[in-house]
Amino acid sequence: MALSEQYLEEDIHPIDIVEHIAEHHEWSFDRIADDQIAMAIEGQWKTYSITLAWSGYEEMLKMVCSFEMEPPSDRMPQLFEVLNAVNDQCWAGGFTYWTEQNMMIYRYGLVLAGGQVASPDQIDTMINAAIMSAERFYPAIQLATWGGRSVEDAMQVAIAQAYGRA
């Protein structure tokens, strides 16, 4: 059964939907407030912290996917260069580095203006896109910052990555 089938005629809060999705996938989560939820999702490279918050004023479901990263201070120019290359490949959301927190951040906002309602499938896709993007580009970021590889070489790892399983 699709996630959306349970909500066909209900007007439900987006964070309630996120909580249901987290339960469905058996992800660890914490309902921080009525309008905010945080969860941890285990990936191949990292455990990703994902926070979703509903802003009624902006009519937007905001998502932040973060993971710790402490690049060498002398490689920060390469980090920012590879982030530009990575963001050129991202059509939904984008990466930034929060230096003070030593955190890599993937952000996305789903605008639901005019009383629009997000479907569970949309929200699930949004969360999975964040994890897939972080998993896809993490090796390129590592190669450019710690591996001493050029951004072009590092990005080849992300571009050449195979999808699916044999």
Image (cartoon, rainbow, N blue to C red):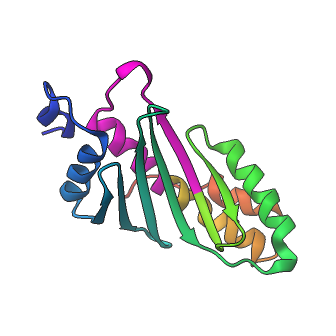
Question: Residue 54, image x and y in percent?
Answer: 40, 43
Residue nearer the viewer, 166 or 153: 153
Q: Residue shown at 76%/77% (left/top)?
A: 147
Question: Residue 105, image x and y in percent?
Answer: 59, 59
Q: Does the magenta run of residues contain 131?
A: yes
Q: Residue shown at 42%/28% (left/top)?
A: 112
Q: Where does the C terminus fall, quadrant-wise?
A: bottom left
Q: Relative to 150, is 71 above or below?
A: below
How many labels, in total?
A: 0
Q: Residue shown at 68%/79% (left/top)?
A: 70
Q: Where does the N terminus fall, quadrant-wise?
A: top left
In the rendered image, the residue lying farthest to the front is: 57
Q: Does the magenta run of residues contain 18?
A: no
Is residue 42 toward the left or the right of residue 79 in the image? left
Q: Relative to 109, is 143 above or below?
A: below
Q: Residue shown at 74%/63% (left/top)?
A: 154
Question: Residue 74, image x and y in percent?
Answer: 87, 78
Image quarter of residue 26: bottom left
Q: Give the magenta-colored segment's residue range.
A: 106-132
Is residue 14 toward the left or the right of residue 139 in the image? left
Image quarter of residue 126: top left
Q: Relative to 68, is 161 above or below?
A: above
